[in-house]
Image (cartoon, rainbow, N blue to C red):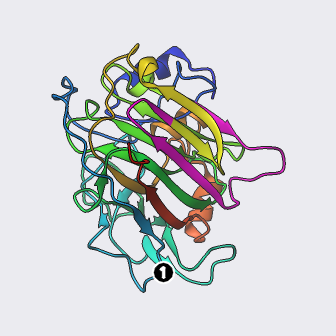
Amino acid sequence: MRIHHWLLQVAALALLAGCGGEDGPAAPPPGAIGGGPTPTPSPSPTPPPTTRAFAEEFNGPQLNAAIWKAEGPNFWVNNELQAYVNSPDTIALRSNVAGADGGVLVLKPKWAPGQDPRSDRKADFQSGRIDTRGAYDFTYGKAEARIRMSELTGVWPAFWLLGNDTWPATGEIDIMEFVGEPGWISAALHGSGYSGANALSRRYNFPAGVRVSDWHIYGVEWSRTAIVFSVDGNEFFRVTRSEVERSGPWAFDSPKHIILNFALGGDYPFGVNGVTAPYRGLPQPTVDAIKAGEAEMLVDWVRVTPPPAP
């Protein structure tokens, strides 16, 4: 992805969780998405539950609250610049979107200075984050989402899977992260011994003439023996169980839930763009675009296909 300065690498080691992309699995970015307590050893092997087929098309009048939980403003990781709120301004469904098949989910940051309830940060923005924890968790299968994103420096939308217990022992699979560099997205794996700055990660570079602001299908195929990432059906990163176990325990035999979120600034974008003003990792043109309502993550659908029967 980029050459890491040693200061950024040291800072990354202090992060609670994260993902990003490199051109190889040995050097992830200093960003982080997930968060959790101090790492603990992986639990005893758990019999994997049956993976149920899942399809969320976002065609209803409102988000299905029986499936999706919205994150609240007390949540904070990675020195990000937003407070998550469950509001129609930040999480909504929309119809008649060009190129979409039916309705879409819209995650949208907004300018909201002076509204942050936490005294230990200065979040001048609000945004949306939703997950399926407890409503739809699964082990193994193919997870895909069709997504379109605004090309703005320092934005940080993501589609990922997270384990349901202590991080990183129960694993994190980052299917897609975008930090506002229009030529690429990244994917990563996190577990005990390979999290934060040591995550296994890779960048996907879009072909010439293809934009991240176009519709794309971001996917992962997850089995007992390997995890394979793709964009529009094109495989770009394959990590086998034996490769993971060179770094630490395989953290991918336990259930994960789906997360869609739109973060702003923070450690990963800052590590890429080096912007310091007006906000860390977020330049003024992006702030202006957010104020104008131009920053969005659109999700046409999310689908999970169970693995083939043994």
What percent of the width, then of the height, locates residue 143?
47, 52
- Indicate the quadrant where residue 298 lies: bottom right
- Residue found 50% across the figure and 44% down from its top: 220
Decide: is 24 above or below 229.
above
Q: Position of residue 155 (x, y in %)?
A: 55, 51
Q: Quadrant of the N terminus?
A: top right
Q: Is residue 59 visible?
A: yes
Residue 42 position (above or below residue 212)? above
Q: Position of residue 74 (x, y in %)?
A: 24, 55
Residue 279 showing in the rendered view: no
Nearest to the observer: residue 59 or residue 8: 59
Q: Secondary structure at mark 1?
A: loop
The segment highlighted magenta reads: 201-227
Question: Relative to the observer, which residue lies in front, 250 or 91?
Answer: 250
Going by the image, does 183 lie left or right of 263?
right
What's the amino acid at mark 1? Asn
The structure residue drawn at horizontal position 63% and vertical position 39%, both measured from the top left corner, is 235
Write down the quadrant of residue 68 in the picture.
bottom left
Q: Specify few, some or many for label 1: CA neighbours under 10 Å numbering under 14, 14-19, or 20 or more.
A: some
Which quadrant, please, contains the C terminus?
A: top left
Q: Residue furthest toward the left?
A: 44
Residue 213: image quadrant is bottom right
Residue 89 appears at what percent x and percent y?
Answer: 43, 75
- Which residue is rendered at x = 51% and y = 54% of the image? 144
What residue does disc 1 label? Answer: 59
Q: Is residue 39 found inside the magenta-colored segment of the image?
A: no
